[in-house]
Amino acid sequence: MTMILPALTEATSPLFRPIKYSLFPPLGLATLAGYLDPDDEVTLLDEHVERVDIESLDSPDLLVVQPYITSARRSYEIADHFRARGVHVAMGGLHVTSLPDEAAAHADTIFTGPGEDTWPLFLKEFRDGAPGRRYDSTLRTLAGLPPVRRDLIKRNLYLVPNSIVVSRGCPHHCDFCYRTRSSRAESPSTPRPWTTPSPRSSGCAAGTRTSSTIIRRAAGRW
């Protein structure tokens, strides 16, 4: 299996600060990799920190692509290339959840919403030779997630390789933001040891916090 996080358009533009997009590794894909069997072979590629020459990549049994709105064009280019080779392509994430019909034209399987309930089901059906075309999530929880496959992350390429996820989604419903359409606020009911790597044991001397909801609005207005 190969997992690819295509680069956002702004991450490759000299008019922006590319260093911003090398802060954190793709924990979403690394978490999905945690559902794989121990003998499954998987590679995780992040175009924000490394060049990915799709022509030189081998054809995996399964390609997983996570597009965002400004990486959709590149995501579809990658997906179409591997589908032409006969590779089964799966897509999910915010953009797919917002525009599933658009994404479905470039993938063999799409996922809407979080993948904790649908991804394991897809893996079983894929191994059985009968994967579905679309999987819609009905579960919203961080409880029971497998350990993040940090062994797949190229730690030296990120500024904050020990980042963790303690909540997901957004409690607000802003009409201009597509995150509202695809997720809602979630948090784990109890802390789990694997979510909090020790900064000292991992050689990290500093920490940081990022959030999409630092700016709040009152009474439905900005």
Image: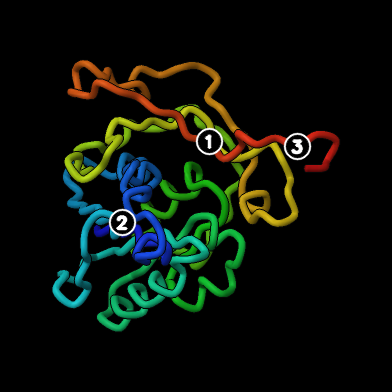
Residue at 17% over, 51% down: 41
The answer to whether the residues at label 2 and label 3 have Cβ atoms under 8 Å apart is: no
Q: Quadrant of the C terminus?
A: top right
Amino acid type at circle 1 is: Ser
Disc 1 target residue: 211
Q: Earlier in the sequence, mark 2 or mark 1?
A: 2
Between residues 25 and 11, which one lies in front from this camera angle? 11
The numbered mark at residue 217 is 3
**Near-viewer residue (112 or 169):** 169
Q: Callout 1: few (<14), some (14-19), or many (20+) C-alpha neighbours within 10 Å?
A: few
Residue at label 2?
48
At label 3, counting other C-alpha atoms closer than 10 Å, the crowd grade (few under 14, some 14-19, many 20 or more) is: few
Protein image colouring: rainbow
- How much space separates mark 2 and mark 3, taking CA atoms? 31 Å
Q: Position of residue 155 (x, y in %)?
A: 20, 39
Residue 58 to residue 182: above or below: below
Q: CA distance from mark 2 to mark 1?
A: 19 Å
**204 to 49, vertically: above or below:** above
Q: Residue at x 26, y 19 (%)?
A: 199
Q: Residue furthest bottom?
A: 84
Dot 2 or dot 3: first in sequence order is: 2
Q: State which quadrant residue 90 falls in.
A: bottom left
- Residue at point 15%, 70% (across, down): 58
